[in-house]
Every structure is written in C-alpha cells, then in structure tokens.
Amino acid sequence: MPEAEGDGLAELYQELILDHYRRPRNQGSLEAHTSRVALANPTCGDELELDLLLEGGTIRDVRFSGHGCSISQASASMMTQLIKGKTLDEARRLAARFSEMMRGSADAAHDRALGEARALAGVARFPVRVKCALLGWSALEESTRDHP
C-alpha cells in the first residue's frame, strides 16, 4: 500500500474513533436488562457499565455508560452497534476476534465481521492502550458467561 494511501486510511480511522467518542452510539442504561456488568481499568481510570437485554439467546438491546479515554468509549460504542441483534455465540465469536486483533493479528484486523471496530487495529501497537480497547468487550464476555 502506498504511504499516502496508508496515511489517508489512518486519518479516516482516527476520525471514526473520534466520532464514536464524541457521539457514542447506544450510550445510557437499560431499565429492563437481563444482565448488567461494571468494569474498571485501574491503570488509567476508565469505567464502563454494560447492560444487555437477552431474549432467547439473542442480544435484543445493549447500552453502555461510564467514562474514560477516547479508545475505551469508542470501542464500547462500536461494540454495541456490532452485537445488537446477534446471538450470544455470534457476539462471543466477535469478542474473540476483536481480542485477536488487539494481540496484533493482521488477519483479524482485516476481518470484515468486525465492522467499524477494525479502525482500532492500530491500538495493538500500544500495549498500555489495549486494555482500554478491550474494556467493553471484557464486560460483554463477563455478562454472557453464565448464559448458554
């Protein structure tokens, strides 16, 4: 890939991350939820609460609240868009794939199933920020652990 094209893509990804940070999707809480998990990253102070409404093994609705850096908040916003309407198995596969991407997998970074969350692939180069990107996904894993 030519350098200019790579720079343009990096800029587009940065804009997408900032857009999700400034205008998070699915932010708030669900009055009627079947699962609620609160997690924090003590290293940087990010906090996140994830509410899921599960019906018949499908994520019917999802919301998140909390505060933190642009990476944690944008990642949670992207994740909620991606998992809404998915089965628990589909959501778990996406979480595993996202984790692979955060460990530096180029294959996962090109996986279209991750949608806009692929914009966060560059975070893998900054180990101290990986926990930020994974916070919402970790909450998803914890909130679905007791569901078949």
Image (cartoon, rainbow, N blue to C red):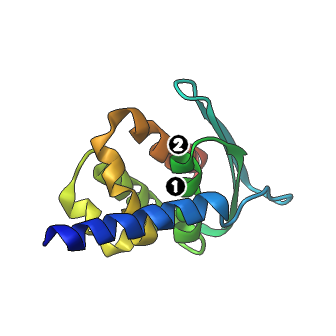
Percent x, y of residue 32: 83, 60
Mark 2 packing: few (<14 Cα in 10 Å), some, or many (20+)? many
Percent x, y of residue 37: 67, 42
The answer to whether 28 is drawn above or below residue 5 in the figure is: above
- In the rendered structure, the answer to whether residue 48 lies left or right of residue 108 reads right
User: Mark 1 and mark 2 in contact (Cβ < 8 Å)?
Assistant: yes
Pick out the residue farthest to the front. Answer: 4
Choose between 64 and 87: the one closer to the eye.
64
Percent x, y of residue 51: 71, 53
The kind of residue tagged 2 is Leu
Please state, as top left, top right, bottom left or bottom right, where the N terminus lies in the image.
Answer: bottom left
The answer to whether 84 is drawn above or below residue 146 in the figure is: below
The answer to whether 118 is drawn above or below residue 127 in the figure is: below
Tell me which corner region of the image, top left, top right, bottom left or bottom right, holds residue 131: top left
Q: Secondary structure at mark 1?
A: helix
Tell me which corner region of the image, top left, top right, bottom left or bottom right, holds residue 52: bottom right
The kind of residue tagged 1 is Ser
Observer-side mark, 2 or 1, equals: 1
- Give the residue displayed 44% in from the left and 61% down from the top: 14
- Give the residue displayed 71% in from the left and 44% down from the top: 66
Mark 1 packing: few (<14 Cα in 10 Å), some, or many (20+)? many
Percent x, y of residue 28: 78, 57
Provide the residue designation for mark 2: 135
- Give the residue displayed 49% in from the left and 41% down from the top: 132
Chain-order first, disc 2 or disc 1: 1
Provide the residue designation for mark 1: 75
